[in-house]
Structures are given as C-alpha cells and as structure tokens.
Image (cartoon, rainbow, N blue to C red):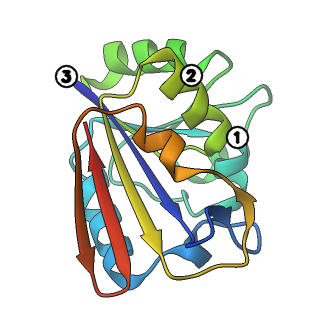
Amino acid sequence: MSVVATLVLGQDGSTTKGGTSQALSSAVDRDRFLARRRTFDCLIIGGKTARNERYSRTPVPVVIISHTEPDLLKVNDQAHWLNCSPVEAIEIARLKFGPEIGIEAGWSILSELLEAGAIDEFELSITTISSGEDRVDYDFILSHFTEVKIEVLDDTTFYSCR
C-alpha cells in the first residue's frame, strides 16, 4: 500500500511553462511518467490540473479534488470528483479503487500532502528547461525523505525519494 507523488520541474524549479507541466517534460521523463501511471489503482489530481493538463483518457480511474464540478467528468468516464482535503481524498480513493495511489497534482496539493506525511514515495524529475512559472524549491521536497536516489538520463535528473 503506497502513495506515490510525481512532479516534473524545470531547472529553475518551475512547475509549469505556458500554464502546463507538459512543456517542462523531456522525452525520457514523459516515457517514465506514462509507464509509472499504469501501475496505480487510481490517480489523484487537483482541479487546476484537470483543467490545464491532458486527462481526457487515463489508464486507471482519476480522482479530481476540486470545490467545483470539473468538466473532465464529461469526457473521461473514469473521472471521479471529490470536494474534500487531499488526505481525505487518498483514504476515499484507497477504499474505492485500491491501495496503490498516484498523485499527479499541482504544488498546493503536493505540499499539503508532504506536510501531512501522506506521501510514501516521491518521483521528482528535473529537466534543463527554464523560464517557467510557479517555482518551488526542490530541496524542500527532498528534505521530507530519508532515502534519495539520483539518476541522470539524457537531459533529465531523476530523484526517487522514500
């Protein structure tokens, strides 16, 4: 039973570029990301992620945490909406879909889950792209874990944190 968060950052700590994280992702990061998400029982995202990223088709159910009903419910029959805290969403998703939860949400949800100690593993990718928006300090993420493995492939540095 585990909760695994994934996040791609630009070299400058940006979480988005042009409003989307996809613009920060490298080819090797994207391949790993798509392979990893197939291993979960469900994915959890936030409302902003649901609006700005590609979630019209997902290999597993996707739970959207939002105060308002997301349009994604109309285009993805595996989409589910919860108006609750991220920690509560994990518990509900675990009961409904299974123990392996992937978190692909934005920084506000990820930071709340980090502070709550609700993330078991964090897969962080840092690409060479910069000049994006919504910067975060990746050392803050790393400080929440006792085991950090680093791997560099092509132009992307991968941090596997536990």
Q: Horizontal and vertical percent for residue 155?
A: 37, 85
Residue type marked 3: Met
Image point 72% across, 72% down: which residue? Answer: 132
Residue type marked 1: Gly
Residue of label 3: 1
Image point 35% across, 71% down: which residue? Answer: 157
Q: Is residue 35 left or right of residue 18?
A: left
Q: Are marks 1 and 3 in contact (CB under 8 Å)?
A: no
Residue of label 2: 86
Residue of label 1: 47
Residue type marked 2: Pro
The 10 Å Cα crowd at callout 3, few under 14, some 14 to 19, many 20 or more, is few
Q: Nearer the viewer, residue 141 or 56?
A: 141
State which quarter of the image contains the N terminus. top left
Q: Nearer the viewer, residue 83 or 115?
A: 115
Q: Nearer the viewer, residue 106 or 126?
A: 126
Q: Horizontal and vertical percent for residue 138?
A: 52, 51
Which of the 4 image quarters holds residue 34? Answer: bottom left
Q: Which residue sits furthest bottom?
A: 154
Reply above or below: 68 against 151.
above
Q: Horizontal and vertical percent for residue 149?
A: 21, 53
What element does badge 2 sit on? Answer: helix
Nearest to N terminus: mark 1 or mark 3: 3
Mark 1 or 2: the one toward you: 2
Reply above or below: 158 against 149.
below
Evaluate whether residue 77 shows in this view: no
The 10 Å Cα crowd at callout 1, few under 14, some 14 to 19, many 20 or more, is many
Q: Horizontal and vertical percent for residue 79?
A: 52, 40
Cα distance in 3D space between marks 1 and 2: 12 Å
Mark 1 or 3: the one toward you: 3
